[in-house]
Image (cartoon, helix red, strand yellow):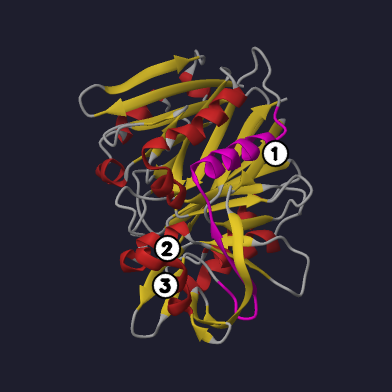
C-alpha cells in the first residue's frame, strides 16, 4: 500500500505534501475533507479528478478538518490517496429522503457491499433527515458481526447541525449516505473512547419519542438540566454540550452510549438529542475536563492495537465529536497530538469533527454503535 497526501486552497490549487505513488492511474480511493463552505463550491473537484482519473473520491465537510496533529485553516481541503497492491474498494450510495428510512438505508448499503472477501466498511453521511441510531441498526442487521463498520456523520463549520456535504465520486452534495467497502488483503484496526465520566444519580427516561426527551424520573427533562447547569443554564443548548447523557438498556448487557444535547424547548420542557434516547432506558449525566478528553483520545488509538511498522504505510481516519472541540477550544489539537505520536511517521492521519461517530466498542464487540462525544479512529493498511 502506498499513499499520497495533498492540500488545496484557491490560491495555489493542489499541492503534494507527500507522494509515494508513481502511477496515479492506479490509485483506488481518495479521502477528501474540508469545510462545508469550500466543499459546496466544488472548485477543487475537477483538478483532483484529473490527477487521479480512476480513483473513487469520497469524503465531505467537517466542523474542523484534521491533518496529522493540526486542524487546518478553513480555506483548505485535505486529501489522502490510497494505492493497493492486492486489495480493492467499492462505493455504495443511498439518497436520504425521509428520516423513517434510516434503518433501510443502512441495510441497503451493506447489501450493496457484501462479498466473501469484505474486510471493513467506512460510512459517511449527511445529518439532515437521518436517524444515526436507526442507520446503525440497519447496518448491523445485514452483515456478519465479524465485519467491522466505522465512520461518522459529517459536520460543518457553523456547528449548528445544518446540512453537511458528502463527496461520492462527483461534486459534493447534501442528503446522501455513502459506505466504502474494503476487500482482499486489507487489515483494519479501530478504537473509540470518550474521556467522559458519569456523575450524580442514576435516572430513568420516563417519557421520550425518538431523540426528544420529555421527562426524566417523571419530571420535566429541561428542569433537570437547568438544575445541574446552574449559571450555565442561560446558555442552553450550547452549554448542554458540557453535560451529555450516558444511556443504557437495563434489560441487556450492552455497554452504555453517550447522547449529545442538540436543542431545548422551553414550552414543552423537553430536550432534543442528536440521536434516539429510548423511553425506559437508564441514564446518568456526564462531565469531563480537558485532560479527560485528551486521555480518551489516547485510549482510542491504543484500543486499535495497531503497531506502526517501519517502511509500511497506513491510513488513519480520525472522527471526533464537535462537542469535544467546543470544550477543548484552543487546545483541540492536543487530542490529535497523542494519536499522531502513537501512529508514527508512516501513517497518514486525516479526518473530521462530526455530529456523531460510528464504531464498534472493541475488537470483542464488533457490531458498530452510534456514539456522541467520542474520538473514533480507524487504521487501514495492507498485509
Give the residue at mark 2.
Answer: 240
Specify whether residue 141 is painted magenta.
no
* Residue 218 visible in the current orientation: yes
In percent of width and height, residue 125 lies at: 47, 54
Residue nearer the viewer, 357 or 330: 330
Specify whether residue 296 is painted magenta.
yes
* Residue 167 visible in the current orientation: no
Q: Is label 3 or label 2 in front?
A: 3
Say which element carries label 2. Answer: helix
Give the residue at mark 3.
Answer: 226
Q: In this view, does 125 lie to the left or right of 232?
A: right
Q: In this view, does 45 lie to the left or right of 219?
A: left
Say which element carries label 1. Answer: helix
In percent of width and height, residue 297 lies at: 57, 39
Q: Which region shows up in magenta?
A: 277-306
In percent of width and height, residue 57 lies at: 45, 37
Res 284 quadrant in image:
bottom right
Q: Are marks 2 and 1 in contact (CB under 8 Å)?
A: no
Residue nearer the viewer, 97 or 229: 229
In percent of width and height, residue 358 lies at: 58, 52
Residue nearer the viewer, 172 or 134: 134
Q: Residues within 10 Å of mark 2 (few under 14, many from 20)?
A: many
Who comes first in sequence, dot 1 or dot 3?
3
Res 231 quadrant in image:
bottom left
Q: Residue at x 45, y 65 (%)?
A: 261
Q: Residue 303 carries which label?
A: 1
Say which element carries label 3. Answer: helix
Residue nearer the viewer, 64 or 197: 197
Residue positioned most to the left: 11
Q: Are marks 1 and 3 in contact (CB under 8 Å)?
A: no
Q: Do the residues labelled 3 and 2 touch (CB within 8 Å)?
A: no
Count of marks overlaid on the render = 3
Amino acid at each position: 500500500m502506498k499513499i499520497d497526501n495533498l492540500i488545496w486552497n484557491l490560491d495555489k490549487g493542489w499541492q503534494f505534501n507527500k507522494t509515494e505513488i508513481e502511477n496515479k492511474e492506479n490509485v483506488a480511493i481518495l479521502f477528501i475533507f474540508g469545510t462545508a463552505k469550500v466543499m459546496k463550491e466544488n472548485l477543487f473537484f475537477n483538478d483532483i479528478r484529473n490527477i487521479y482519473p480512476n480513483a473513487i473520491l469520497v469524503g465531505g465537510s467537517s466542523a474542523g478538518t484534521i491533518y496529522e496533529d493540526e486542524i487546518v485553516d478553513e480555506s483548505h481541503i485535505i486529501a489522502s490517496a490510497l494505492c493497493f497492491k492486492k486489495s480493492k474498494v467499492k462505493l455504495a450510495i443511498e439518497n436520504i429522503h425521509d428520516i423513517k428510512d434510516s434503518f433501510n438505508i443502512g441495510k441497503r448499503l451493506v447489501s450493496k457491499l457484501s462479498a466473501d472477501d469484505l474486510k471493513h466498511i467506512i460510512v459517511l453521511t449527511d445529518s439532515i433527515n437521518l436517524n444515526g441510531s436507526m442507520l446503525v441498526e440497519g447496518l448491523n442487521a445485514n452483515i456478519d458481526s465479524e465485519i467491522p463498520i466505522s465512520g461518522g456523520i459529517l459536520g460543518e463549520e457553523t456547528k449548528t447541525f445544518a446540512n453537511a456535504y458528502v463527496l461520492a465520486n462527483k461534486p459534493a452534495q447534501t442528503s446522501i449516505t455513502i459506505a466504502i467497502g474494503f476487500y482482499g488483503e486489507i487489515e483494519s484496526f479501530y478504537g473509540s473512547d470518550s474521556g467522559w465520566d458519569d456523575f450524580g444519580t442514576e435516572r430513568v427516561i420516563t417519557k421520550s419519542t425518538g431523540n426528544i426527551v420529555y421527562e426524566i424520573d417523571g419530571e420535566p427533562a429541561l428542569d433537570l438540566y437547568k438544575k445541574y447547569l446552574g449559571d450555565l443554564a442561560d446558555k442552553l443548548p450550547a452549554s448542554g454540550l458540557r453535560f451529555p447523557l450516558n444511556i443504557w438498556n437495563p434489560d441487556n448487557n450492552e455497554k452504555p452510549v453517550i447522547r449529545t444535547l442538540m436543542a431545548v424547548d422551553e414550552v414543552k420542557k423537553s430536550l432534543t438529542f442528536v440521536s434516539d434516547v429510548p423511553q425506559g432506558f437508564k441514564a446518568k449525566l456526564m462531565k469531563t475536563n480537558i485532560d479527560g478528553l485528551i486521555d480518551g483520545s489516547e485510549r482510542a488509538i491504543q484500543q486499535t492495537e495497531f503497531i506502526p511498522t517501519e517502511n509500511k504505510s497506513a491510513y488513519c481516519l480520525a472522527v471526533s465529536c464537535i462537542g469535544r472541540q467546543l470544550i477543548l477550544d484552543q487546545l483541540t489539537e492536543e487530542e490529535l497530538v497523542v494519536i499522531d505520536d502513537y501512529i508514527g511517521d508512516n501513517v497518514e492521519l486525516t479526518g473530521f469533527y462530526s455530529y456523531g461517530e460510528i464504531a464498534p466498542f472493541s475488537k470483542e464487540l464488533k457490531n458498530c454503535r452510534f456514539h456522541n462525544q467520542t474520538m473514533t479512529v480507524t487504521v487501514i493498511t495492507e498485509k
